[in-house]
Amino acid sequence: MMSGGLISIHESMASLKPSERKVAEYIVNRPEEVINLSIQKLAHRTEVSEATIIRLSRTLNYKGFQELKLRIAGDLAKKQSSNSYQEISIDGTVDSFIANISNNNIQSINDTLSVLSRDEVEKAIEVLGKARKIALYGIGASGLIAQDFKQKLSRINRWCEAAVDYDSQGTISANLSEEDVVFGISYSGQTNDIIQSLNIAKENGATVITLTKYGANPVSKLADIKLFTSSLEKSIRSGAMSSRISQLNVIDILYVGLTSRNYNESVAALERTRKAVEHLKKHV
């Protein structure tokens, strides 16, 4: 079932134009009503043009208003059987921590599946598989995601390097070419170091893949391939908890995709690295 309409609206709200935001707020407040409205009736009730509603749908990466309505209808159907994000109280019990954190992580992955484009994932797997070099960039918590991906790619014999500071990122970007891929990770999509590094790589012809939260942002605007995650939890945001889990889930999807496309070579590389690590452990 198609879904993700309400999630995409929530996460894009801050970047929408005023007229588009007016429609978006109406939809969020009356989703059950909107799925039964024609574009003409919604335009009349929100006092905007039909073109504005079409632009909003396309801003959200949908083909048109009809697809947006289908996705909202899917959200409403899923809402009946799913949980919402749970607030984390500092004076909660251990049982509540276990239940709430686990629920939030599960919800974040489910919401990400609603906004993650299958076509963009397919393109990412294809270009990563053909790349001469893969540069992985992230700052802070996103740097940990980049390092996780590097460890995975290294085990299947992909030349890659993870850089978690601007000096390293800029140096790597300066030496990339059209044969290479740069993968920029920034949950906010606002990280200035990542933006500068991706610009340098793009100027040198490298293919740019980004992984950010859903919606228009400076990092994703630089991308040839845009991958999005969703994490709408409102509590303890500084810990980058559920957002990190959803990012790691996307990385695992790409890794398995790459491994399956070159299965025999990947299995052989995994076996070689396993033996090498075991050999080192025996001689420590």
Image: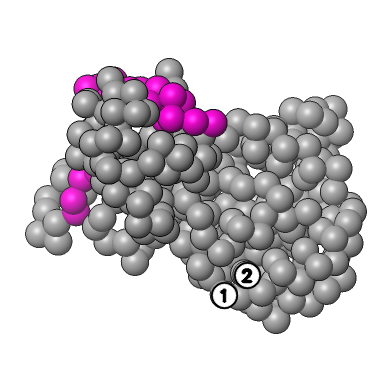
Secondary structure of the residue carrying numbered label 1? helix
| Mark 2 crowd level (few <14, some 14–19, many ≥20, 10 Å Cα) | some
Q: Residue at x 89, y 54 (%)?
A: 179
Residue 175: image quadrant is bottom right
| Residue annotated with mark 2 | 195
Q: Quadrant of the N terminus?
A: top left
Could you say where residue 207 lies in the image, as x and y percent from the top left? 78, 54
What colour scheme does the image use? Answer: one colour
Q: Quadrant of the C terminus?
A: bottom right
Could you say where residue 267 lies in the image, as x and y percent from the top left? 79, 32
Could you say where residue 14 lies in the image, as x and y percent from the top left? 36, 58
| Residue annotated with mark 1 | 192
Circles 1, 2 touching at the beta carbon (< 8 Å) = yes
In the image, the segment drawn in magenta is 63-88
208 over 264 or under it: above or below: below
Q: Is residue 101 magenta?
A: no
80 over 234 or under it: above or below: above
Residue 262: image quadrant is top right
Q: Nearer the viewer, residue 168 or 189?
A: 189
